[in-house]
Amino acid sequence: MLQELKGNLRRLFNVTNKPESNQHEAQSLLSNRSHDHLDLYAEGEHDTHNIVYWVFFIYGIAMLLPWNVFITASEYFLKRFADTPYAETFQNYFSTSFTATNLALFGLLLWRQSNAATFRLDVLGPILVNTTVFGIMAITVATSVHGTGYFWATMALLVITGMTTSVFQIAVFAEACRFPPRYIQAVMSGQGIAGVAVAIASLLSAFAGSATQAPDEASITTSAFIYFMSAFAITIAALAGRIIVSRQPFYIKQSQLSTGILSTESLDDDTDMEEGDNSDDHHYTQPTSAAIVIRKCGGLIFAVAYVFVITLAVFPSITALIKSVVRHDPDDSQRIITDGNRFLDDDVFVAFHFVLFNVGDWVGRTLPIFPSMRTFKTKLLVVYSLARTLFIPAFMMCNVVVSDRKMAVVIDSDVVYLVLVWIFAVSNGWLGSLTMMAAPQQESITSATEKSLVGSVMSFSLLVGLAVGGSASFILRAMV
């Protein structure tokens, strides 16, 4: 290419003092060469129509669908498992099997990624498997299958989705970390939207029902079918997105930066680009491991875990027990007051708090789009994360309605409680996104391999935070 450029310049020099026709030839040669040069590099520099961004957004939605759909359809499973020994404990089986499978396989994949010279997962596999699982579940909802056999078949499918979710998470975050920070924000925002959709569905279901009558089996079955078909449609969209995005020049260029140092080279020098590609070969064998990444980003790894420890410690285990002070007298929680306001009934009030949290969480995950709401300073993010500890005593002082309450109700206002939920949710989404976005942007994380690995480590730390927070919720529940 260098010789070609020299030849073109020599021809240009030779014709500059010739007749006008030759001057036009020279101008045409220079114009065509410049356009070809710009087209060659500009093609992969920008995310055309933000297609790659929105595909990562869909990935975020699809990432949380398996668990959200199974827990949202709890009334359906209660009906189908009614004549089995698991009618009252199936949710425990669901959460334990899904979480254990997800964490175990994620840890194994992270270990494999840390110790392999080259390691890359494709999102196509888990998307295909999840599409099949949701299709099977939608078919079973339309039938009358029930009983112990159906319970164990559902458990098997849930374990499979736990495995695919871990593969999907590690693949998406490892891939998103190779892109600019806003692509991680897209994944986090998509996760937030998934929660909003499920929460709104629950609220509408509560409003459609009665406070005194249980919903009939037909409506429960219809709702479950809609849940699983919606999940099926989203996974199909993620599958289509995977096919579309693989043809985008921007995506291809970012993905090809698989081992070298991620840097911006001059677009005006072909030789620099070609020689840069070869000169970075010595970076390909730089030792990278999870231990090295943890040492470089330990503060952020702690921060993202602690954000979700605090969140899961009180939500929903404690917050779902908080009822309206208008319905339940704070001085005597067992005395129920009726005034005809449907919104204050326990089922709607609790469902609304889920919607409020999930909307606030999504707003928080979206805020880092704006530069004024973004910081990648590790110490500051750790301080903000630790500050959320104050939410634990705040919620425990609200109107938690339990038969064996030990703590006095200090916050006896529904408005104050809902404001607390909003701040709690926004801070969760905001800090969760910022910590995930900040890790691959640290100066010590230089190669694409390290960026992928730190994305996986951060995602695993987030899952550990969820698990620890869920375990801590039992202790806090006993303290109320």
Image (cartoon, rainbow, N blue to C red):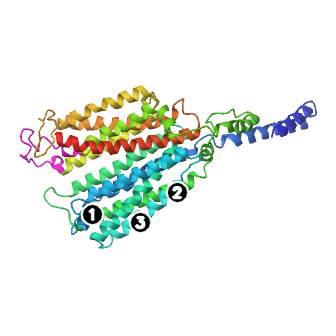
Is 82 displayed left or right of 276 in the figure? left
Report the Cα–Cα distance between label 1 and label 3.
17 Å
Q: Is residue 330 magenta?
A: yes
Q: Which amino acid does label 1 sit on?
A: Phe
Foreground tag (3 vs 2)? 2
Q: How far apart are marks 2 and 1 (CA)?
A: 29 Å
- As helix, strand or loop, the secondary structure at mark 1 comes to helix
Q: Can residue 58 be seen in this view?
A: no
> Do the residues under discs 3 and 2 have CB atoms within 8 angstroms?
no
Above or below — where is 142 with respect to 237?
A: below
Residue highlighted by disc 3: 135
What residue did someone put label 1 on?
Answer: 77
Identify residue type, mark 2.
Leu
At x 58%, y 39%, the residue is 448
> Looking at the image, is mark 3 or mark 2 earlier in the sequence?
2
Question: Given the image, on which type of amino acid does mark 3 rest?
Answer: Gly
> Is residue 211 placed above or below 276 in the rendered structure?
below
Q: What stretch is highlighted in magenta?
A: 317-346
Which mark is first along the chain, 1 or 2? 1
Viewer-closest of 16 and 287 = 287
Q: Which residue is drawn at 22% across and 42% down?
A: 475
Give the residue furthest to the bottom.
144
Mark number, residue 124: 2
Quarter of the figure with residue 4: top right
The percent coordinates of residue 206 (x first, y second) are 22, 54
From the viewer's perspective, tell me whether residue 46 is left or right of residue 2. Answer: left
Secondary structure category for the residue under label 2: helix
Query: Could you classify mark 2 by the number of other residues whose Cα lies within 10 Å: few (under 14), some (14-19), or many (20 or more)?
Result: some
